[in-house]
Amino acid sequence: LVFMLEGVFTAAACGAKIVDKCSDYPVYREGKLFSYLNVHCSVAYGEVAGVHVGDFETKMEYLILGEPIDQVAGAIDIAGHGEIVASPQALVFLKDTADLDDCVKLDSKDPQVIASRSNCYFRPKGDDLEIKDWKVELPTKANPRERLANRCIDLDYEGLRRLRSRMCHYIHPVV
């Protein structure tokens, strides 16, 4: 149960940081403001299953299925630019780890806005959780090309050919 509580809080905190840092992101062209990029996020809770579909010779996809996918889809439809919205199922766990502002209605069956741009409508309870300044670091100093080369060093020609084919056909729709 502790892992679920922390997971929902961490997802909400991460989403709040994303909308804070990435909303209304200016895009310049030839030194002049050209446009703005925007972001919106949603948080859900539940069990999911991941399934590889396809074969190694034509095309391979990775599907994620489960109730949280429907929750995220419903919540993201409500989220405006620069907002993060939590599903009612996620709010059940978030209320146990965070103090929520009055604007977040826990008795509603609808997803609720929990942060918008620089406004976060929840704060961690106690000292165990905190909204961190997230940084991502690679676990090794090797660059991606070197890591791939190290994995392929023992493959023969046929093994390399199959790997190349798999990599070419494994294309996720988001990419």
Image (cartoon, rainbow, N blue to C red):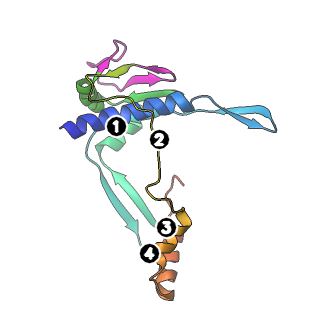
Q: In the rendered image, which residue does mark 1 sit on? A: 71
Badge 3 marks a residue whose secondary structure is helix
In the rendered structure, which disc, 2 or 4, sits on the residue that comes first in sequence?
A: 4
Q: CA distance from mark 1 to mark 4?
A: 32 Å
Q: In the rendered image, which residue does mark 3 sit on? A: 147
Image position of 159 (left or right of 143) = left
Task: Please state the horizontal and vertical placement of residue 38, each as a whole percent of the image.
Answer: 58, 32
* Part of the protein shown in magenta: 99-120
In the rendered structure, which disc, 3 or 4, sits on the residue that comes first in sequence?
A: 4
The residue under the point 80% across, 35% down is: 31
7 is higher (above) or lower (below) than 173: above
**Residue 73: quarter of image:** top left
Q: Are marks 2 and 3 in contact (CB under 8 Å)?
A: no
Q: Nearer the viewer, mark 3 or mark 4?
A: 3
In the rendered structure, which disc, 3 or 1, sits on the residue that comes first in sequence?
A: 1
Q: In the rendered image, which residue does mark 2 sit on? A: 135
Q: Nearer the viewer, mark 2 or mark 4?
A: 2
Residue flagged by tag 3: what amino acid is it?
Answer: Arg
Residue flagged by tag 4: what amino acid is it?
Answer: Phe
Q: Residue 58: in sight, yes or no?
A: no
The residue under the point 27% across, 35% down is: 6
Q: In the rendered image, which residue does mark 4 sit on? A: 56
Badge 1 marks a residue whose secondary structure is helix
Task: Residue lying at the far front in this picture: please name it.
Answer: 141
Residue flagged by tag 1: what amino acid is it?
Answer: Gln
Image position of 74 (left or right of 146) = left
In the rendered structure, which disc, 1 or 4, sits on the residue that comes first in sequence?
A: 4
Task: Please state the horizontal and vertical placement of residue 151, each as a whole percent of the image.
Answer: 45, 73
The residue under the point 45% across, 37% down is: 134
Between 126 and 67, the one nearer to me in the picture: 126
